Amino acid sequence: MKSHTKVAIIGGGIYGVALAYHLSELGWNDVILIEKGELTSGQTWHAAGFISTYANYGNTSIINNASASLYKKLAQDPELDPGWITSGSMRLIYNKFQYDAACLGVGIAEQAGVQAEIISPQRAKELNPFLNEKPLIGAVYSAGSGSVDPARVTHSIATLARRNGVEINRHTRVTAIEQLPSGEWKLITTKGEVIAEHVVNAAGFWLREVGEMVGVNVPVTIMKHQYIITEPLPEVIEFMKGGREFPTIADPHSAMYMRREQQGICIGTYETSGAVAPAPNGLPWEFDTELLDDDLDRIAPFYERCADTIPIFAKAGIKNIVSGPQIFTATGLAYSGRAPGLRNFWIHGGSAAGITQSAMGKFLAQYMIHGEAEISMAAYDPAGIGRYADREFTIKRSTEQFERAFENHSPYDEPRYARPTFQDPLYDRLKNAGAAFGEAFGWEKANWFNTGSGPAVDEDSFRHANFAPYVEAECKAVENGVGIANMSFFSKLEVSGEGANRFLNSLTARAIPENNKITLTHYLTEHGGVRAEHTITRRPDGTYYLLFASTAGQRDAAMLKLALPSDGSVTIQDVRYDRGSLLVTGPKSRELLSRLTNADLSNAAFPWLTSQTIEVAGVPVFALRVSYAGELGWELHVALKDLAPLYDALFENGADLSVTNIGLRALNSLRLEKAYRGFGTELKEVYSLDQAGLNMFASVKKESYFGRDSVLKEREHPRKTKFAYLKIENSDNDAWGDEPIYADGKLVGATTSGAFGYRVNSSIAFAIVDAEYATAGTELEVKMLGELRKAVVHDRALYDPENEKLRS
Ligand SMILES: Cc1cc2nc3c(=O)[nH]c(=O)nc-3n(C[C@H](O)[C@H](O)[C@H](O)COP(=O)(O)OP(=O)(O)OC[C@H]3O[C@@H](n4cnc5c(N)ncnc54)[C@H](O)[C@@H]3O)c2cc1C
């Protein structure tokens, strides 16, 4: 084994091997891979080998398709043939909700360059004669899908990696990892030590344990997953005489997948209840090329349902049962990105469909080498889940991922297991007021309020659903009276010390505010993409108060800590759980607050975008004159213990002003009417501020900050795509993001987010389009749930473009 290397990858499953290959393809071939057993000896060897290029979610389609493309390429070479079979795949559709999901998915596929279409039940039966098509209303057919031999494909990719210079060490276990003063990493293994510039934890079942070696929490759980291979079936033998293949099936009715295996079939289920996490404390290091005990009794009821869909299965003999441990994450997506708080340490794994998604390694390789990837890696960022995800939480969430694996999820779907998460002091009050809660980075947030009858539960729908009239009422309350939103779940940091101003200014694309002023500012990547967005307020004592998205809490704190000067002149304190906040907004908000404070809230004394420490209802409040709703308003930041008394006083004194609880759904609608770009949808690493139309937020006057060179370059050579703000013809649904956009029938972009704007009575969306289609007045068409809808580009907010209400 080498003693020094640029990259050391821990784990020789498909994830580690594919990453090694893609790094070497991109020119980083000083790579070693360390595997404690044989390659594939974790879970890769026993995977069922299904590869569906179609997926319901944005980047997943691109990743799946990229994996399949590599497998098809390997199949051209007899030496590397991974056993690829192009069979096509079908996802069955039984009801309107699934049909809507399919329409959205087919639109996503179109942008990802993946073949996918909705076909009739009859056509589905023609393609796969073993199917009971009677209960179906259709199926999504993706002709490019297929299957592969998971072990063979891993070995083929390993061969390519070796040819590129990658060193693969088998039967070598990493037992400890230390960071050296130089910043490099020392890996201690059973066969000696190696020093690496970068380390990648691709340890599959042992992601958590390898993370613990460097103090990082990697929340993964092992679930028990079983599939069956049948004896040869005469019907399959007969079918094969024509030299044909039938598409694989994904069936939401029986939560089952099915494909041909030799002359029989392979069927696996994801039980929709009673799923088992067989190793809550992890697997021993010695576990190697092993399976778990079969448990046919437990899965029998699910297999009975499989026979509803594939009747020949009812009489099939069982040749083999594979009962394998399978990794799941607390987010339901793989982790692929920087380990929070560590330099040059990466986490790559946790995918429950890692054979299908091996191309995640291609995008991580791009990200490691170039600092950005073709696709946004944000959803896979290991920092996207916090320390609150302990073992118990992760088991519950993994169980949910497993049991709901075959469900379609509405865009409003919230996690159901491991709930409620952290409840701030308003939780019970909001619950009694009818709140339907969601989760924001381990904190319960109110999405909307059911002020009518029945439970506060979201209907499964992609259209205007049960909550729409309530969200409308909340928006109207904000327009005409006062709305109060509990924003306590936001991330909050305090940055202080003699070097704080210099430190923040070196990172942000806009000047840091002066005393009491508030600035919305962004942190850029070296390529000018938006890495973070913070509302920063300077307090008179020189402390900076940073407010930002809950999901970015861990990531941004880690980013700032890694950038801290070594002289100790700056201190960062996380105050998320110390402070709460209420947004009090609407034309009557000044009147309401004036009843509870002696402070002068007039425009002259307390202008827009300034802050003051005042007393409201006897509570010390740090008040910021801002409103994400685009109305007159203040955010009131208080010690968490003061949140409930403040909230009670506002409601007790505001009855005649129609004071109303508002939730996050209303705020999303209100922000779209104001054309505020959303962090995570319009503002993310793959897009620049100029692309988002926020040129004024990327200063060229400011002499130095991270990413400035890219801003200057982009001003000379603008990017080819730009954001468009769209007013869309009304219907019973709005854009969710990822809907394709056409100009004269040509695909020119996709939506990124949308909602119905009740103050302007219009469906609104943001979209990323070819730059020539982003100018005001351009007419476009958006394909939404299968229907083409007219849209017009606007260059000003549809509501109060001059900010008169905010300044009123
Ligand atoms: C029954 C079943 C069926 C499946 N079917 C499919 C399917 O049809 N399609 C699909 O896409 N996916 C499927 N999967 C999922 C797929 O198997 C996994 O997503 C994939 O194998 C994950 O690969 P990996 O490289 O992340 O992990 P692994 O394959 O587990 O590799 C991790 C490797 O790291 C090594 N390692 C760990 N710690 C150390 C250390 N300290 N030092 C050195 N080496 C270490 C391990 O020995 C192991 O080989 C299935 C899974 C199961 C259980």
Image: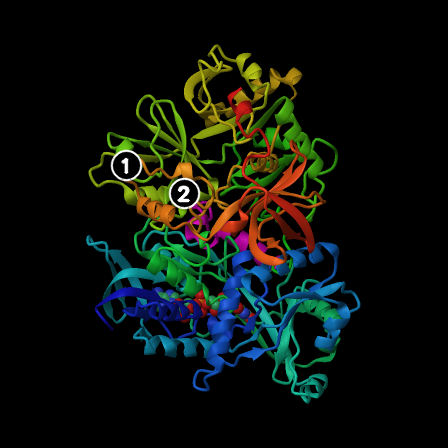
Disc 2 crowd, CA 10 A, few/some/many (<14, 14-19, 20+): many
As displayed, is residue 111 above or below residue 660? below
Residue drawn at 23 percent across, 57 percent down: 184
Q: Amino acid at mark 2?
A: Ala
Residue drawn at 49 percent across, 75 percent down: 71
Residue drawn at 35 percent across, 37 percent down: 699
* Picture coordinates of residue 313, whole percent (x, y): 71, 76
* Picture coordinates of residue 191, whole percent (x, y): 26, 71
- Find the distance from the CA under tag 1 to the CA under tag 2: 15 Å
As displayed, is residue 669 above or below residue 13? above
Identity of the residue furthest to the bottom in this view: 241
Indicate which disc residue 503 carries: 1
| Screen quadrant of the N terminus | bottom left
Residue topped by disc 2: 532
For residue 485, which quarter of the picture? top right
**Magenta range:** 379-404
Q: Tell which circle, 1 or 2, labels the residue nearer the N-terminal end.
A: 1
Disc 1 crowd, CA 10 A, few/some/many (<14, 14-19, 20+): many
